[in-house]
Image (spheres, grey):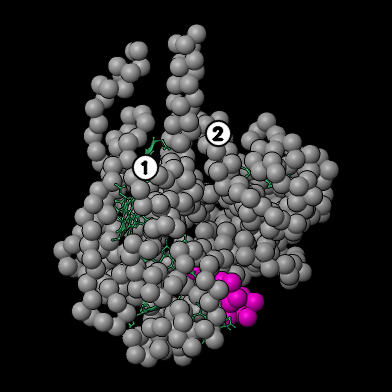
Amino acid sequence: MKKLQLIASMMLGLAAAGSVSADAGKDTYTKVCAVCHAGGIAAAPRYGNAADWGPRIAKGVPTLYQSALKGTPKGMPAKGGNLTLPDASVKAAVDYMVAAAGGAKAAAEPKADAKKEAKAEPKKEAKPEPKKEAAKEAAKEEAPKAAAAPAPAAVAAAPLVQEGASAADVNSFNRLLKPAGKRNLPPPEDGIHDPANDGTHALQPPLAAFGSLPKSFAGNRVNWVEAIGSGKIKPRWDRTDLTAEPIVMDMNVVREVKGSMPDVVYPHKQHTQWLDCSNCHPAIFTPQKGANQISMASILLGEKCGVCHGKVAFPVSECRLCHSKKKDLVKPATAAAR
Amino acid sequence: MRKLLTGLRGGLFVGLVLALAAVLFVDIQDAQAEYGDVVINNHSDAATMRPVIFPHWFHRVRFACKVCHADLGFKFKAGGNDINMVKIIDGQFCGACHNGEVAWSVENCNLCHSAKPGTPTQVHESTIQKLAQPSGASQKK
């Protein structure tokens, strides 16, 4: 399983690694390395995480340069999969990540000291980048304490800081799936709004708005197609002209899929209720059946259908909404026999 | 020979599909993205304002995508529009509506500038964000 994840994330990494004209380490990091190193895909050492990087930095920075340039058997692709990158850019990106993890100092101090380190020098770290990352991590942890001390090492320290709570939770029923009660939280609890801001408390909680709308099983759990179809919501088609109506075009485009998955039916109807032709044509899709290369990997990476789906429209987990046309499974079988 | 080749190719394909499945597996386990809030922080932190949270879901209840993404020219990219306050008070971007006529006006700073300081630009809880979950980290939510 792990190996597969590696392959998969390498695919993602390769697909993501577009053309890069970077000289600065930060630029290279953002464009190429962050795909894996921001969140730790395939167990890549995470950006700004001293515990992940400490033992590696201990090997010496030149060794890390080599790993980054040549790749490692455990999943680091050579140059992050972007072989056209100049060596200097790759090294700069390594420097950038090493610095964010506390630099060579982190290697000298054993992991157990991460907590101490976090407490001892939150002010000294003035670099904006690690601070952001730490705040993001802290937001995920929903630990207000950690947010107050946004030092890079706070990321590593966070699990240690949470004393009693995590011990009770290790064998909770759902380790990764978010329980129903934690979905669509009101702004002060959602991890990104600042509860100390008075405006936060004046905002509408999502569930107050969603209560009267038809439900779905994914995303923000609203079936937006039905909501607009049944007239539960009437989004304006013009900023001020209340009489403007969309020109809905009912045209399906079938995309045949290799393998066992049902074919994809792309419906113009549900899209043109919301969108203008110019939103998709020609920037995202050439308006010609089959003229566009679309794959699930690109959708997951936020391209093609993934520009919207998984960000502001229903996510990829709802396979059957897109893969909706049953196909004749006999045909491929006979083809294989030949 | 031919059989072998097709076999090989088949194997590769299965491999790819499995690899994809692995990604999806992670996704399904973890995710069910709850897209809806866009954090915009190109300038806010530097200007010591709280970053902006744009409640996307709230606006789509009231306007079709076309209004913002075609008529008003918002690009499909969180943080991709280089918005600032001058543009807003001159009636561009958020200011096309938050002008005291279509919606409340700009003096309500804290309704827009409502994020925890330091929150990076993002589509909160989007699938791509979920795919990049820390692998070894504590998954407490």
Most prominent secondary structure in the magenta stretch? loop
Kindly identify which chain the residue marked by label 1 belongs to.
Answer: A
Residues tagged by mark 1 and mark 2 found on one chain of the structure: yes
| Residue situated in front as seen by the camera: A256 or A197 | A256
Q: Residue furthest front?
A: A288
- The quarter holding residue B76 reads bottom left
Q: Position of residue B102 (x, y in %)?
A: 33, 86
- Point 33% across, 62% down: residue: A277
Q: Chain of mark 2?
A: A
Q: Secondary structure at mark 2?
A: helix
Judging depth in this view, the residue of A279 and A37 nearest the camera is A279
* Residue bearing the label numbered 2: A7
Residue linked to disc 1: A290
| Left/right of residue B112 with respect to residue A100 in the rendered view | left
Whether residue B49 sits left or right of residue A253 in the image: it is: right
Whether residue B26 appears in this view of the structure is: no
Tell me: A234 left or right of B66.
left
Q: Is A193 within the magenta? A: no
Amino acid marked by disc 1: Gly
- SS at badge 1: loop
Q: Is residue B121 visible?
A: yes
Which circle, 1 or 2, is nearer the viewer? 1
> Magenta part of the protein: which range?
B39-49
Residue occupying the point 18% across, 68% down: A232
Counting from the top left corner in percent of width and height, residue B63 is at: 31, 73
Q: Indicate the amino acid at tag 2.
A: Ile
Farthest left residue in view: A230
Q: Residues within 10 Å of mark 1 (few under 14, many from 20)?
A: few
